[in-house]
Amino acid sequence: MRNIGITGLISSLVVLTVIFAFREEEQKPQLSYDPLPLPLPHYEFLNLAENVLHFPQHSNSYDDVWESLDRALFEDSASFNIVHMGGSHVQAGVLSERLREHFQNISPGMDAKRGLFFPFKLAKTNGPSNLRFERIGEWDAQRCAHSRHDAIWGMCGMEVSSVSDTCGLDLYAIRTDSSRYGFHSFTLIHSIEIQADQSLLKADRIEVDSTLRTTTYYWNSPQDSLALRFYPQDGEEVKIFGGLLDHEKGGIAYHEIGVNGASTKSYLRCEKMPKELELLQADLVVFGIGINDAYMSKNDFDKEDFKLRYKAIAEQFRAVKENVQFLWITNNDSYYRRRYPNKNAFAVQEVMYELAEEYGGAVYDLFEVMGGLGSISDWESAGLAKADKIHFSREGYVLQADMMFEAIRQSYGKHLEEKYLTNNIK
């Protein structure tokens, strides 16, 4: 058992996570993670009464989720796997990394897994700052969100390929400025016909799965960096579809799947995704897809088609683990063509509640928490959103993550109180 009791955990949920302590003056949220209480700034446009998890069926629909989280906190060998799926909001990495930090700091000494990633630097695009890459050779990229691109994508929705005589990457898994994510295994999703140079990886064991297109390298001692080199011959092509960092202990893994411009249609183009999801064994899927689906005039948006596509993706996760549960995030407020408040946000909001009703999941109503229609202008004025009135600034993503985790913390705290404290009193 981990070195923490039930009472200690409940206390840590209060002390080590986000607590709202509003200040009279407006100020921007901190950017670095602080395990002490994080006072959030006060903005008049926020609707914090909605900063909760909504359960259209019943809160007990998350019983399996909270039980899995309990085991990860109290048992050394147990893991809790979260998958956060979206578009550019996720690819940038600020939102997901902040949430990863919050989850992995619930309990002191929690084992942290970096999880699924894509080497975006090889594609010459933006990505999370907690993975640092050095690109070797020249690479071309294909992404599922680009209508003219075509590849056999997997769950990451991206592909990079190279025919350079020497190609590869150096990876450094950075957790904070003073520490790194340790891993005992590295799973590379790639064209397995060409294997990486083992003399650089120096793995203690290697497993190849041609069905999943994976090569997994295992080490007896923890690693925090690696070097991949490929030497294709006679026009051979090396293709990389993603990677996964794991370690031999249990703990919390926060996997991220995000592609700039991706919609539900984009991910349904990823024919290898249903099989590759087996690698993640998700307990909770945070669904944040939708902003790109709804970027159109109100007359052009088909609510029912959008819902059916979302269900098709959800079923792919359910096929892997029947009791996986979902957290449906409504679209953030945005403007269409920077001029018109995007009223499709209301239709997306309805779909999220309908899906939570059907699947028994929870809704985080970001649209309402932000302040509703037109509120993105207030966020922009406060330095929390960009001028395109779709994306957030770094400070805005941090604020979103802090508020969202506070809603999760409250719900999980109620579970702990009901399961342990209330029952013990009786």
Image: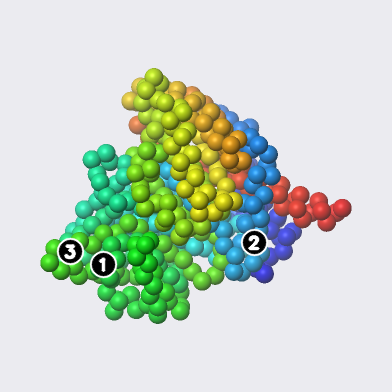
State whether residue 288 appears in this view.
no
Report, in whole angstroms, how far the alpha carbon at label 2 lies from the one at label 1: 39 Å
The quarter of the picture where residue 69 lies is bottom right
Q: Position of residue 113 (x, y in %)?
A: 49, 62
Residue 90 sits above or below residue 174 on the image: above
Q: Secondary structure at mark 3?
A: loop
Which of the two labelled residues, at mark 2 and mark 3, occupies the earlier sequence position? 2
Label 1 amino acid?
Glu
Report, in whole angstroms, how far the alpha carbon at label 1 lies from the one at label 3: 9 Å
Label 2 amino acid?
Arg
Quadrant into which the N terminus falls = bottom right
Q: Between residue 141 and residue 223, name the one nearer to us.
A: 141
Residue under label 1: 193
The number of numbered discs placed on residues in the rendered structure image is 3
Q: Between residue 274 and residue 6, name the one nearer to us.
A: 274
- Judged left or right of residue 29, residue 75 is right
- View extreme (right): residue: 426
Report, in whole angstroms, how far the alpha carbon at label 2 lies from the one at label 3: 46 Å
- Judged left or right of residue 91, residue 304 is right
State whether residue 274 appears in this view.
yes
Residue under label 2: 71
Residue under label 3: 236
Label 3 amino acid?
Glu
Q: Residue at x 71, y 49 (%)?
A: 415
Residue 40 sits above or below residue 188 on the image: above
